[in-house]
Image (spheres, rainbow, N blue to C red):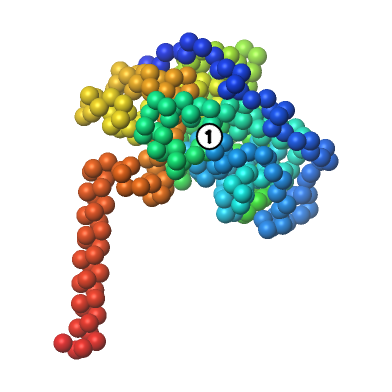
Amino acid sequence: MKRPKAPSPPLAPTPSTPPTPQQRRSLNKLLKPVSKKPLNIFQNSPPLPTDAIKWKPLNISKPELYLPLTFPTGQTFRWKKTGPLQYTGPIGSHLVSLKQLEDNGVGYYCHFTDNEDVAINDLFDFLNMGISLNDMWDGFKASDERFAELALYLEGARVLRQDPLECLFQFICSSNNNIQRITKMVDFISSKGVSLGNVGGFDFFEFPTLERLALVSETELREAGFGYRAKYIVGTVAALQSKPGGGVEWIASLRKLDLQGAIDGLLSLPGVGPKVAACIALFSLDQHHAIPVDTHVWKIATRYLIPELSGTTLTPKIMTRVADAFVSKYGKYAGWAQTLLFISELPSQKAILPSNFQNPDEISSTKLQKKVQAMQETKEKSVNKRNRTGK
């Protein structure tokens, strides 16, 4: 049975100008010399207590990177929270922890690496530190009053620059799925790679090679709970292995294409639809104006950007209009703006935002919940009083 042809992806016009030198910083200015001594604390050693870590500063301020708004927001499922304001994850063959420090800067610790200098360069690349979030957000705030208000509470939400192969398989797992199940699936795939060690009770692995993934059968994946996605994982591995130059080179080469070319390439793989393709393009292929459109992003767009489409059905045509609206408003880094707006709608973040950022329906629902809770508390107090008095 042939796989149904994926609908046209939500594409936006290609930016007319590339990023300016001012928007891309030299990594050399951000980095300090570090030790070349290889680290491997996990050879015949128990997990390192987090309170024993001596954090080294990355010289990155909170407005440029705030970890709780970057890692647990659906960009990657390979990084774990291993302590208060602390996240740990693999970057290639390195295992690194990051922590938001008391001065709001960011500290790092390399648990495992053959070369710490290389690890830190790879870390800065992964964090997309060649792009100034401050400069970008200044432009967004000038054109969008609501974004300017949100930025006061949600500063430091960065878009990561992940390895394309890792990003691809993570988001195939994400299709029609919840975060808990996605994480379990990604952990299962990751466990086929080389072990990097254990931090905070979590095992970490270098992402497996295509050759290693090719040894995993569809049956094994189904038994691990992948469901219909098992077929897509196996099919995508085979499709990548058949690409000219090998799958790793091929998917990395998509970074050199425009958004349409990158999306078309991704859509040729089993299990990759328009939203998954846009996520991979934004989070790993330098397609900064890619807009992953789902029902949440659609609601954001119809509430604030294109209210005339409110109440319509989310079709491929509407998805394209939503993506166009974001790029029209925010320009060549529209994907970064969309990411911040998406984060602002997450329940964990709404809890820290003032009530004026909730829509009327949400405010009414909150008031009703509080009213019901107050009535229940009053009833309980009355019952307790009668029990005490015996009346």
Q: Say which element carries label 1.
A: loop
Does the image show residue 313? no
Residue drawn at (53%, 34%), measured in percent from left and top? Answer: 158
Q: Quadrant of the C terminus?
A: bottom left
With respect to residue 171, does 49 lie above or below?
below
Q: Quadrant of the N terminus?
A: top left
Does residue 335 appear left or right of residue 96 in this picture?
A: left
Residue drawn at (38%, 28%), measured in percent from left and top? Answer: 144
With respect to residue 346, does 231 lie above or below?
above
Quarter where residue 2 is shown: top left
Quarter where residue 313 is shown: top left
Residue ID for mark 1: 158
Q: Position of residue 366 (x, y in %)?
A: 26, 52
Is residue 253 or residue 269 the one in the foreground?
A: 253
Extreme-front residue of the structure: 142
Residue drawn at (78%, 45%), measured in percent from left and top? Answer: 40
Is residue 107 or residue 7 the one in the foreground?
A: 107
Residue drawn at (39%, 43%), measured in percent from left and top? Answer: 346
Q: Position of residue 206 (x, y in %)?
A: 66, 37
Residue type at the position of mark 1:
Arg
Extreme-left residue of the structure: 391
Does residue 130 appear left or right of residue 279 in this picture?
A: right
Extreme-right residue of the structure: 37
Q: Position of residue 75 (x, y in %)?
A: 50, 35
Does the image show residue 334? yes
Label 1 CA crowd tier, 10 Å (few <14, some 14–19, many 20+): many
With respect to residue 123, does 15 lie above or below?
above
Does residue 380 appear left or right of residue 130 in this picture?
A: left
Does residue 328 appear left or right of residue 230 in this picture?
A: left
Quarter where residue 274 is shown: top left
Q: Position of residue 367 (x, y in %)?
A: 24, 54
